[in-house]
Structures are given as C-alpha cells and as structure tokens.
Image (cartoon, grey):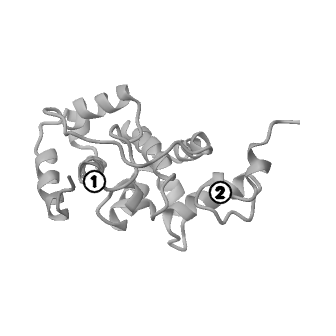
Amino acid sequence: MNRPHDCRPLLMTELLGRPARPGALDDPLRPLLASLLAGRLLNQGVLSATLGLSDGAFQTLWRNYFPGAQLNLTDGPGEIIVELEDLLNLLLEYRAGVHDSEVWLAHIVAYSCCGRNHLWQDLGLADRGELCALMCTAFPGLAALNIDDMKWKKFIYRHYCSREGIYLCPAPSCGECADHAQCFAPEV
C-alpha cells in the first residue's frame, strides 16, 4: 500500500530523531539517506529493499545511522544493469573521501541508474535538489564537472561514455545503447 507523499516529512522526522552513532550523527549525508529510506517505504524509485546495498552493508548503515526498529521496505522494480560495476567505479573515483556513507551512496546511485525516470525519481528522493546536495557532498569532483547543470543520470552516463571513448551515448542504460557490443564485447 502506498502512503501519501505528505508522510515523507513524518518519516524523515522519525528517522532523523533516532540516536545515531557519533560519526553518523554529524554526517551531512544522513538526511539524504533518510530520504532514500522514506522514498523506498513510500514505494518510490527503483531501489531494492536494501537500497541496492549488500545485506551486510545495509545492516551497518541501519545500525549506525538509524538504530531501532527497521522499516518494512520492499523491493522496487530495479534490475542490475550491465554497466553497474563501471558506474560504481566512476562514482567511487570521485567520492569526497570524508564519510563511509559515500561508498554506500556510490552503490545506491549506480544501482538507481537502471531506472527510466530522472535519477532523483529513480532514487526515491523528494526532489532534484536533494540529488544535487547528494552529488555535491558525496562526489564533489564529479559534481564540479557538471557545469551546465545537465540532468544527473544523463551527465553520469555522458561522463562514463566519454571516458570509454564513446561519444554518442543517447541511451539511459548501456543495455539499450547501439554501442553496447563495442563496450562489452569479449577482448580480442
């Protein structure tokens, strides 16, 4: 059952009111993680019930950032994409290196690239502003390259494709791209 969108502020207040561990309490990414959880609880986005993280990583996130009773999260419609590891590596390369949550967010953002909507929607965030805050805080070097304020998913894919030497990358997912065989063919 979907909850009305006006439940998000209540969910956020409840999650952020929990007694997080010291390192997590002062992490500026904690409110964004709470928003991701709220979005998943509201069945928004494509993330899995563990936000695209391994069970162990999700449990660590939960224990450190939002201890207490877990939310009853369900899987979204997301699927693993062919280029997941490459997108993850790209994001990890640009992480700020300040908080462990940046690694989780690299996994979460890479996983969300499988969706067909704007990245903030596929993440289950409240709006694009939250995604901009996430990118600028967790991946500031990558965010600084987005000088034209391109939509984030398109920007991430364009950056990925240009690094791989593919200059026509119109698809939101490499699985749909005409250059897919060139990128993922066996080595000759």
Q: Nearer the viewer, mark 2 or mark 1?
A: 2
* Residue extending farthest right: 188
Q: Name the residue at 73% across, 65% down.
A: 168
In this view, the residue in front, 165 or 10, is: 10
Percent coordinates x, y for residue 29 in the rendering: 31, 48
* Residue extending farthest front: 1
Quick one: label 1, few (<14), some, or many (20+) residues within 10 Å? many
Residue where numbered disc 1 is placed: 39
Could you tell whether 171 is left or right of 33 in the image?
right
Percent coordinates x, y for residue 140 in the rendering: 47, 55
In this view, the residue in front, 75 or 101, is: 75
| Amino acid type of the residue tagged 2 in the rendering | Glu
Could you tell whether 37 is left or right of 181 in the image?
left
Quick one: label 2, few (<14), some, or many (20+) residues within 10 Å? few
- Quick one: quadrant of the C terminus? top right
Q: CA distance from mark 2 to mark 1?
A: 27 Å
Secondary structure at badge 2 equals helix
| Amino acid type of the residue tagged 1 in the rendering | Gly
- Which one is earlier in the sequence, the residue at label 2 or at label 1? 1
Residue where numbered disc 2 is placed: 176
Could you tell whether 159 is left or right of 73 in the image?
right
Q: Name the residue at 18% across, 58% down.
A: 8
